[in-house]
């Protein structure tokens, strides 16, 4: 019969204390959740004085020393160290998370590979595509990919407007070809993946941010003037938020009133928009605003 693996001691001095008092705490928490037992143990442990805790620490060290001795004998007898319950539980949870991510990824719709690809980068993008290899040859063999972009950017900036124009013309030509191809794709595929319908620019815009949004819109310029000239946008947000928090309730209610008024106007305008643009289409616009 194979030797039995020694049980790893856990919890340190608190673990010893918990085992000593487990029956007492379980009895006191009868009828409650199991978590209440450990919660009670934690509370009682904190109540112990500095003189009361060392004996438990001493006992834990003794238990740990015995475990090390027993484990050494177990391995010497041909035993194989297996993972404990906590480690197995953690491993199982990790595997479950990975499987969940994998299944989620599989469940996502794949973008249609036939969707026309939109040209990017403007004139510079065309310049980089045509001159990338030549620029790479001029760099050290151990160069990084970012070095290519930096070198290309520097060369592009040094070009005159006359020399940049051919690349910009190529970009505009490709953009025109793309728009034609994309319209053709839409005719054949409708609202397929990668072919999203544009939002109607005439649809009423829903006010956002609540009463704080109204305060931010009205006071951002004034608050920004009080900040250093080289302030970051995050500094402005922090300053506005701090002033908003310092406002009295009566002052906040003024902005709440403005927000509710705008919301009422929005709903009125949306109802009118729906009548003029068709119920289904207008409903989609309203749903997007939510």
Image (cartoon, helix red, strand yellow):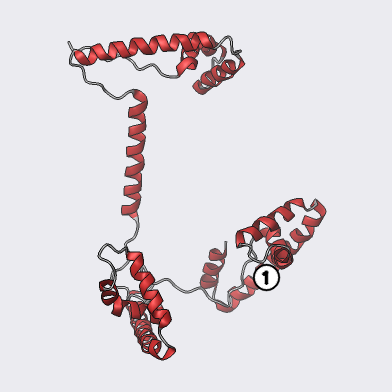
Q: Measured from the top left, where is residue 164 in percent x and y?
A: 39, 86
The residue lying at 54 percent from left, 64 percent from top is 287
From the viewer's perspective, tell me whether residue 15 is left or right of residue 290.
Answer: left
**Quarter assignment of residue 93:** top left
* Mark count: 1
**Quarter assignment of residue 227:** bottom right
**Closest to the observer, 166 or 248:** 166
Vertical order, 81 against 246 (above or below): above
Q: Measured from the top left, where is residue 156 in percent x and y?
A: 39, 80
From the viewer's perspective, tell me whether residue 94 is left or right of residue 21.
Answer: left
In this orientation, does residue 23 appear?
no
In this orientation, does residue 151 appear?
yes
Check disc 1: other Cα within 10 Å, few if <14, some if 14-19, many if 20+: few
Vertical order, 138 against 245 (above or below): below
The residue lying at 60 percent from left, 75 percent from top is 273
Question: What residue occupies the far right of the structure in this picture?
Answer: 250
**Closest to the observer, 253 or 21:** 21
From the viewer's perspective, tell me whether residue 235 is left or right of residue 171.
Answer: right
- Element marked by disc 1: helix
- Which residue in the structure is indicated by mark 1? 268
**Closest to the observer, 198 or 285:** 198
Vertical order, 88 against 208 (above or below): above
**Closest to the observer, 128 or 36:** 128
Q: Measured from the top left, where is residue 104 in percent x and y?
A: 35, 50
Q: Quadrant of the N terminus?
A: top left
The residue lying at 28 percent from left, 14 percent from top is 71
Q: Measured from the top left, where is residue 174 in percent x and y?
A: 34, 84
The residue lying at 69 percent from left, 66 percent from top is 217
């Amino acid at each position: 019969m194979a030797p039995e693996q020694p049980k790893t001691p856990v919890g340190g001095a608190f673990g010893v204390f918990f085992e000593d008092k487990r029956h007492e705490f379980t009895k006191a928490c009868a009828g409650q959740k199991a978590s209440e037992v450990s919660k009670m143990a934690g509370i009682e442990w904190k109540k112990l004085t500095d003189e009361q805790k060392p004996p438990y620490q001493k006992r834990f060290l003794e238990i740990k020393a015995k475990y090390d001795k027993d484990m050494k004998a177990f391995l010497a007898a041909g035993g194989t160290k297996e993972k404990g319950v906590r480690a197995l539980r953690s491993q199982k949870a990790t595997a479950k998370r990975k499987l969940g991510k994998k299944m989620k990824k599989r469940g996502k719709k794949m973008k249609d590979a036939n969707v026309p690809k939109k040209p990017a980068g403007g004139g510079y993008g065309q310049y980089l595509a045509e001159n990338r290899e030549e620029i790479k040859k001029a760099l050290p063999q151990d160069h990084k990919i970012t070095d290519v972009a930096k070198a290309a950017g520097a060369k592009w900036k040094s070009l005159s407007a006359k020399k940049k124009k051919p690349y910009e013309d190529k970009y505009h030509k490709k953009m025109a070809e793309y728009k034609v191809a994309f319209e053709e794709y839409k005719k054949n595929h409708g609202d397929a993946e990668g072919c999203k319908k544009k939002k109607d620019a005439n649809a009423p815009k829903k006010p956002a941010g609540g009463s704080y949004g109204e305060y931010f819109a009205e006071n951002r310029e004034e608050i920004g003037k009080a900040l250093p000239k080289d302030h970051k946008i995050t500094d402005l947000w922090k300053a506005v938020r701090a002033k908003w928090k310092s406002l009295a309730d009566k002052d906040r209610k003024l902005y709440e009133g403005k927000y509710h008024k705008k919301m009422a106007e929005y709903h009125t305008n949306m109802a009118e928009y729906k009548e003029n643009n068709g119920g289904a289409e207008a409903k989609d616009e309203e749903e997007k605003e939510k």
